[in-house]
Each structure stands twice: as structure tokens, then as C-alpha cells.
Image (spheres, grey):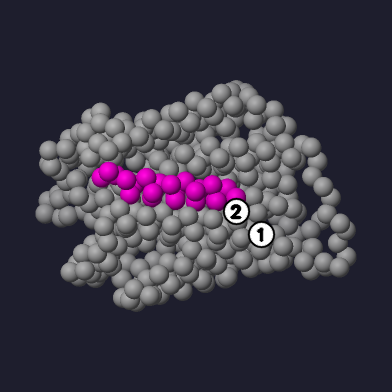
Amino acid sequence: MTDAAAVSAPAPKQHQPRGIYLLFGVEMWERFSFYGMRGFLVLFVAATLAKGGMGWTKASASRLMSFYAFACYSFPVLGGWLADRFLGTHRALVIGGFIIAAGHFTLAIPSVPCFFLGLSLVAIGTGLFKTNASTMVGQLYRPGDQRRDGGFTIFYMGINVGAFFGQIICGYFATNSDWGWHWGFGSAGVGMVLGLITYLALRRHYLPGIGDVPNRVVAAAERPPAEPMTREERDRLTALLVVMAFSITFWIAFEQASTSLNFFADNHTRRTFAGFEIPAPWFQSINPLVLFVSAPVFAALWTAMGRRGREPSTPAKMAWGLVLVALGYVFMVFAGLASASGALVSPLWLVAAYTLHTWGELCLSPIGLSFVTKLAPVKVVALMMGVWFLATGLGEFLAGQLAALTDWIAQGSLFHLFGGQADFFLVLLVLPLAVALALAVMTPWLKRRMHGRDV
């Protein structure tokens, strides 16, 4: 038995493999850096030169975010391919982490060339890191191991712990006049360094054999010709790709958090309490906070339904995710109506929207990560994890492009129903509902092509 197989063998009491907690930690710090910077990026770009920003319009800042996010989530396709073919997931993760840290520290230098170089480095590093951290979680489990979904839920909670503290800490430094934007960028880099130190110190003890260089690279001259995919493998890949395509709409709606919803928090929301002005990026921390509280509830719900033979399939769960993200925008339509007079609105509108968006995320994102490792053939699992993130990247790109049209739609250029930003948020309510209905209709067809692997 290989080391990897020894690690992935189920324990008699079905405890999670210890390596999941190390991957929880390293992913937590990487997401601290990623979301910590993302929380204030558009605010920095749209801030005036007098306030230390770049002086761009909100529309241009949203478009920049769309290109940056697309790069961060499309480069994992290349990162997965490099890991599958040459590097192994462990080495790709470490290289990516160092590049991410270098990018954040470059962003901390107040210079326009350093700003664009730093963004590029973070995107490249994320491409190597992101897909391979998730793939290593899947490598802890053998096919059919019932602990897999639970492991990905633990891993996903690490993502959100990092996102919560990153947006609080980096957002505070960035928007506090005593520190400034570039302190926010630098603090994000510190988080990535801490994650790498922890991982490298504990990896041999907790992840022996996981993520090593693929055997076909070590002994390339001896490997037999690659076998063609079986019909079942092709069917599963088809189902996987179709589900990925549906997930794009979810991310279009969900990822308004860093653009249109971020600007709404900054410009239209009452943020002063007891003399303290809440930084606008802090509203984005509602998402990871609610997720951390709700994830065990959702995990228990799926388990209880599974015992009764009533657990929804992955496509059905994702359809519910689309419905929930749409319902979150019901609150934002009312918030848009309330803000039409120019008055600052209650922060509870954003709290309610982010809560429903988070519940939708729990129905789609951690389930999707596990879904990839279930359906993708072993020889291309890292590559397909990259394709999953590519779908996320397409959603992020379209989210930013749509956010750039906020004022255009609010002015009635597309249609005029409620007027103002309420019409913009209405688009984000209707679109996911329509796609959820289409996915629900296709679910039986998708289940047939999974050939029983959705367990």
C-alpha cells in the first residue's frame, strides 16, 4: 500500500484524516490574503487621488475587478495542468503561495506600475495555489469514502474563517486614515506568509505522500500509453461540465459583493454607530460569519436527509443555491427603493441579502468542489478542478461587467419598472431564478450520466 493510500484509508470510527486540518489552515491564510484585499480593491481604485486612491470611475473600477477576478479563477486551469503533468499538487501549491505573497507586498508599494504588477502576481500565484489545495483535499479519500463531503465542508469553513478575518483586518487598515490603502495590501501578504510557514513545517507529518510529483513524471519513459476514457467517464465529464456551466449564473449574482454591493454599502448605507464608522468592506465579512455558523447545520441537514434516503442530488442542491441567491436580492430591491430619495438606508438590508446569499453558497460551492473529485477521472482531476474555478472566473468576470452597468440600468436605459438601483437588483433576482428552473428540469438527465457517483 502506498503512503497516499494509507492516508486515505477510512479509520474504524470514521474520523477525518488529520491532513484535512492542515489544509484547512493553509487555505484559511491564503483566503485571508485574497479576500482581505478584495474587500477594498474597488474602493481604492475608485477613491480620489486626494484620498490616496487611483481616481477611476466606479464603472471602471468594477471592470478592473472583473478582469482581475477572471484571471485569478482562470489561471487554475493552467495550475491544475502543471500539477497533473509536472509539479504535483504539493509543489504547485508552495510555488503559488510564494508568488501570491510577493504580489501583495508589491501592491504595498504606492506606485501605479507596482499596482498592476502586484495584481498580476497574485492572479498567477492563485492559479497555482487554488486548484491544487482543493485537489489535495480530494486526494485524502478513496472513491466511495463517505467522509469526503464532510472533509470538503471542513475545508470550506477554513476558506471562510480566513475571509472573515481578512476583510476585517485588511479592510480596517486600508480604510483607516491613520494607516491607509497600502497597509491593507501589505497585511494581506503577511497572512499568506503565515500560511506557507505553517504548511511547510507540518506537511511531512500530516500529509505524507499527498501531493507528490506524479509517477508519470518521475518515470516518464516507463509509462504505458494513456488509455482512452470509458463511456461512463465521458458521461460523468459531460454531467460535470453542464453543472459547471449552470454555476456561472450563481457567481454572477453572488460576486456582486465586491463591486455593486460594496459601493452600495459605501455610498447608500448608514454605517455610523455610537460615533464609530463601520468600514464598508466589513459588510462582506457577513458572508463568512454566517457560513461558519450555518455550515454545520447544512452538513447535519444533508446527513439527516441521507439517512432517510431523501438527500437531494448535487444538481438539485445547486438549483436551490440559485433560488436562495435570487431571494437575497428581494431585500436589495427594497433597499434600492429606499435609497432612491438619497437617504442612507438601514444596514439590515445588506445583512439579510448576504445571509441568503451565504445559504445559497452552502448549497453550491463546497458541494461543487466535492462533486469534481467524485466525477473527474483521476488522471485529470486537478485539471478539472481548474475548470471548476474557470467557471467561477467567468461568473466573476460577468459580475464585474454587469456591476459596471449599475448606473446605466438605474437611469432606465435597459427598462424602467421601479427606477434607480432597484431595477439593477431586480435583474439579479430574475436571472438566477430562471436558471434554477432550467437546472431543475435537467436534473434527471444529469443524474443518469453520473452513473451513481453522486454519493
Query: Residue 366: percent from the left, percent from the top?
Result: 53, 43
Q: Amino acid at mark 2?
A: Gly
Query: Residue 311: percent from the left, percent from the top?
Result: 58, 27
Query: Residue 101: percent from the left, percent from the top?
Result: 46, 71
Q: What is the spatial separation of the Cα atoms under label 1 and label 2, in whole angstroms?
A: 8 Å
Going from the N terminus, do you reach mark 1 or mark 2 first? Answer: 1
x 49%, y 48%: residue: 394
Residue 81 badge = 1
Q: Residue 177: name its quadrant.
A: bottom left
Mark 1: few/some/many CA within 10 Å (<14, 14-19, 20+):
many
In the shown orientation, is residue 62 left or right of residue 338?
right
Q: Confirm whether the magenta stretch covers residue 394.
A: yes
x 46%, y 62%: residue: 29
Query: Residue 253: percent from the left, percent from the top?
Result: 40, 40
Q: Confirm whether the magenta stretch covers residue 377.
A: no
What's drawn in magenta, residue-wise? 387-408
Q: Nearer the viewer, residue 137 or 349?
A: 349
Q: Amino acid at mark 1?
A: Trp
Q: Quadrant of the N terminus?
A: bottom right
Check whether the beta carbons of the residues at disc 1 and disc 2 lie within 8 A of each other: yes
Q: Quadrant of the C terminus?
A: top right
Q: Secondary structure at mark 2?
A: helix
Q: Which residue is mark 2?
A: 386
x 19%, y 45%: residue: 269
Q: Nearer the viewer, residue 415 or 16?
A: 415
Judge whether 3 appears above or below 182 on screen. above
